[in-house]
Image (spheres, rainbow, N blue to C red):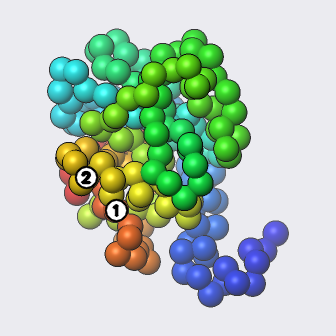
Amino acid sequence: MLPPIASLFDPKAVLRERMKGERRAAAKARPDAGVHAAANFMKSIPRGESAVVSLYFPMRHELDTEPLVAALIEEGVTVALPVVARKKSPLVFRAYTPGDAMIAGSYGEQIPAETAPEATPDILVIPLLAFTRDGGRLGYGGGYYDRTLEKLRKTGAPLAVGYAFGAQEVDALPLSPLDQPLDWIVTERGAVKC
């Protein structure tokens, strides 16, 4: 199926379509990638004793975060998942432990029930379609993580960690001034400080 004609003139939309295929192929080729990425994260990303780490519940061939959730919980870290509370607004985060009650979010993603306490992350593990080694990120186009990082960076210094397959790396991205940079990239191949 071809993308709509308008997206043919939008470099981000064209790249998004291409990178969805790259990610799908990487997920098929490396079903163990989440285990290796989790090990790279745990070895490389600095975490405080009482850190709150937000993750995503994977969908659409995103890199599996289950091994990372298990490792963080074993370490005693608080894990949170993002929630779209309102369209075109920053994300909120709710605490999560495997086995908690989950509900469908705005985009069909699994999120903690409304009774789960909110938590402000010190580290955000962010899904993406493409990344550059210098911290550029191509997301899905909703701007949720960009708005969230902009808001959190006004009052603190959260760590933004892109979490992806190594095959999602590109040399350059068509970024705008609104696109928030990543501090780290973690893949099944390793971890890179941007």
x and y, in percent, of residue 134 in the image: 26, 64
| The N terminus sits in image quarter | bottom right
Residue in the foreground of this view, choosing between 160 and 112: 112
Judge from the rendering whether residue 91 lies leftward or rightward of residue 13; answer left or right.
left
Report the mark closest to the observer, 2 or 1.
2
Residue in the foreground of this view, choosing between 164 and 56: 56
Residue in the foreground of this view, choosing between 43 and 174: 174
| The C terminus sits in image quarter | bottom left
Residue pictured at 75% horizontal, 84% vertical: 5
Say if residue 14 shows up in the picture: yes
Residue 67's label in the rendered image is none
Q: Which residue is mark 2?
A: 153
Q: CA distance from mark 2 to mark 1?
A: 10 Å
x and y, in percent, of residue 93 in the image: 45, 34
Q: Tag 2: Cα neighbours inside 10 Å, few (<14), some, or many (≥20)?
A: few
Q: Which amino acid type is marked by label 1?
A: Gln
Residue pictured at 25% horizontal, 26% vertical: 51
Residue, far bottom: 9
Query: SS at mark 1?
Result: loop
x and y, in percent, of residue 127 in the image: 48, 48
Q: Which amino acid type is marked by label 2?
A: Arg
Query: SS at mark 2?
Result: helix
Judge from the rendering whether residue 64 lies leftward or rightward of residue 6; answer left or right.
left
Q: Which residue is mark 1?
A: 180
Task: Please report contact status of discs 2 and 1: CB closer than 8 Å, yes or no.
Answer: yes
Say if residue 28 shows up in the picture: no
Residue pictured at 59% horizontal, 54% vertical: 87
Q: Tag 1: Cα neighbours inside 10 Å, few (<14), some, or many (≥20)?
A: many
Which is more N-terminal, label 1 or label 2? Answer: 2
